């Protein structure tokens, strides 16, 4: 009997050892809803310091900052302040010199929507790993118009900053005379910005819905600049080959977006399917390609999917969209975000997924591709599902960064109507281990 017990224990030990490398990724809670706080944390963004990979910085609505200097073992939380006001929609970038940039909406008067709320896009800079930030510069001040939903990118060689966003003649207005447009500004140092110019041809309304021109997202291929956005159930692309001085006369329509960019997802007050555009600046065979990811309901309102397209000729032509999520279909996958590790050439996409449930339970998945988006592998990265409720604002986006084999997805989850911000620090080697087939013993 004792021998049998020992054999069972030994077998269990071997099983545990063999499966240890396949354990779920450790989820890290950076923040959660606190009583008395005006805004629950959501809409997170994250960046890895290109000079110091142990330094990872994240941010969330409204003005929350999270910093680790030991690769995610410990985190410091602080509140971002600026004389221009901090009003959400945070966007983090890092250049190769270790400088960090934080873009966000403004509210210099601190009042409601009838004051100087979101009257510009603010850029704050940190040179000490995100522990302290400059008061900030700004772009787009054009009263009484409103400036919303920024995103930015860096020119890899020059470190020039390119900033795009949506300008509303009057946010929320149903007046047909009020329009929304995609704006562009550039800076050499993040301290002084060029006069914004409108780059889209087709204007939208101001209702912040499918007919609104929304989601301007910039990307740089070598010295060529590209911007993608959504409006009227379409995704458009514009480009400049002279650092934003001139743009195409006619925007390129690059994708249909079934259901528009404001998708209906049960349990979510609203779900953006806005396009994410990135450029391949790696040294792989796909260098110079453009990658586009977005969500839509091509397969019906009960079957939201994540779609991917690639262009190898600067946006003139695009591949047929492929479905990123590898479930059997009939469930919702939504709120994707994409990045690329330019040191490895691997594409990463984070998104929410309900493939395992018939109700509103929601997981978080990571998809990745090492063949330029030709194929994707999917892995669940959340430790447990959550159930959102439409009564609480969930936020408009997730985020992810990757560099030197380190991947940092970040997302919002909701439990009992309260949001929290989660991340996990993933090593590319751990993903590779999951792909390796079990080794068979050679016969003697």
Image (cartoon, rainbow, N blue to C red):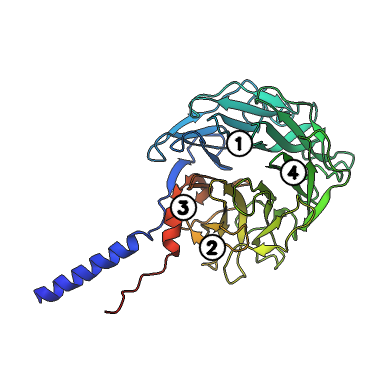
Q: Nearer the viewer, mark 1 or mark 4?
A: 4
Kindly state the secondary structure of the residue where label 3 is placed. Answer: helix
Residue bearing mark 1: 90
Relative image position of residue 183 (x, y in whole percent): 78, 36
Q: Point out the frontmost of discs 2 and 1.
A: 2
- Element on which disc 4 rests: strand
Decide which of tag 1 and tag 3 comes sooner along the chain.
Answer: 1
Image location of residue 239, percent across then percent down: 79, 43
Are the residues at dot 1 and dot 3 in contact (C-beta closer than 8 Å)? no
x 80%, y 45%: residue: 238
Real-space Cα separation, disc 4 to disc 3, in angstroms: 28 Å
Residue 377, disc: 2
One can see residue 417 in this view: no
The extreme front residue here reads 444
Cβ–Cβ below 8 Å for labels 1 and 4?
Answer: no
In the rendered structure, find residue 428 and report the number of the disc placed on it: 3
| Side of 107 relative to 438 (left or right) | right
- Of pointers 2 and 1, the one earlier in the residue sequence: 1
């Amino acid at each position: 009997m004792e021998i049998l017990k020992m054999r069972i224990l030994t077998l269990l030990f071997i099983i545990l050892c063999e499966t240890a490398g396949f354990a779920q990724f450790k989820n890290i809670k950076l923040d959660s809803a606190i009583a008395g706080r005006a805004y629950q944390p959501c809409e997170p963004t994250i960046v890895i310091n290109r000079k110091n990979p142990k330094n990872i910085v994240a941010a969330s609505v409204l003005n929350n900052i999270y910093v680790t200097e030991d690769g995610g073992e410990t985190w410091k939380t602080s509140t971002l302040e600026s004389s221009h006001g901090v009003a959400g929609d945070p966007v983090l970038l890092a250049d190769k010199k270790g400088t960090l940039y934080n873009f966000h909406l403004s509210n210099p008067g601190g009042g409601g929507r009838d004051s100087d709320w979101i009257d510009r896009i603010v850029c704050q800079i940190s040179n000490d790993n995100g522990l302290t930030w400059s008061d900030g510069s700004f772009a787009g001040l054009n009263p009484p118009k409103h400036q919303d939903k920024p995103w930015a990118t860096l020119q890899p060689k020059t470190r020039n900053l390119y900033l795009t966003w949506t300008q509303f003649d009057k946010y929320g207005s149903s007046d047909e005379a009020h329009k929304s447009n995609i704006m562009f500004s550039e800076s050499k140092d993040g301290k002084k910005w060029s006069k914004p110019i409108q780059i889209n041809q087709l204007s939208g309304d101001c209702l912040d819905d499918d007919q609104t021109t929304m989601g301007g997202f910039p990307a740089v291929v070598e010295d060529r600049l590209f911007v993608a956005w959504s409006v009227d159930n379409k995704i458009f692309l514009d480009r400049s080959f002279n650092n934003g001085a001139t743009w195409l006369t006619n925007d390129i329509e690059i994708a249909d977006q079934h259901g528009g960019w404001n998708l209906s997802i049960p349990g979510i007050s609203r779900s953006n399917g806005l396009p994410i555009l990135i450029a391949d600046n790696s040294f792989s065979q796909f260098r110079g390609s453009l990658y586009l990811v977005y969500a839509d309901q091509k397969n019906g309102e009960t079957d939201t999917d994540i779609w991917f397209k690639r262009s190898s000729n600067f946006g003139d032509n695009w591949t047929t969209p492929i479905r990123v999520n590898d479930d059997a279909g009939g469930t919702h996958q939504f709120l994707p975000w994409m990045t690329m590790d330019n040191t490895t050439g691997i594409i990463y996409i984070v998104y929410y997924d309900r493939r395992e449930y018939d109700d509103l339970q929601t997981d978080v998945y990571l998809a990745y591709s090492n063949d330029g988006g030709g194929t994707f592998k999917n892995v669940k990265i959340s430790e447990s599902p959550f159930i959102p409720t439409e009564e609480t604002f969930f936020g408009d986006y997730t985020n992810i960064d990757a560099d030197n084999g380190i991947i940092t997805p970040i997302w919002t989850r909701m439990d009992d109507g309260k949001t929290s911000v989660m991340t996990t620090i993933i090593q590319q080697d751990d993903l590779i281990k999951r792909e390796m087939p079990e080794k068979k013993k050679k016969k003697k």
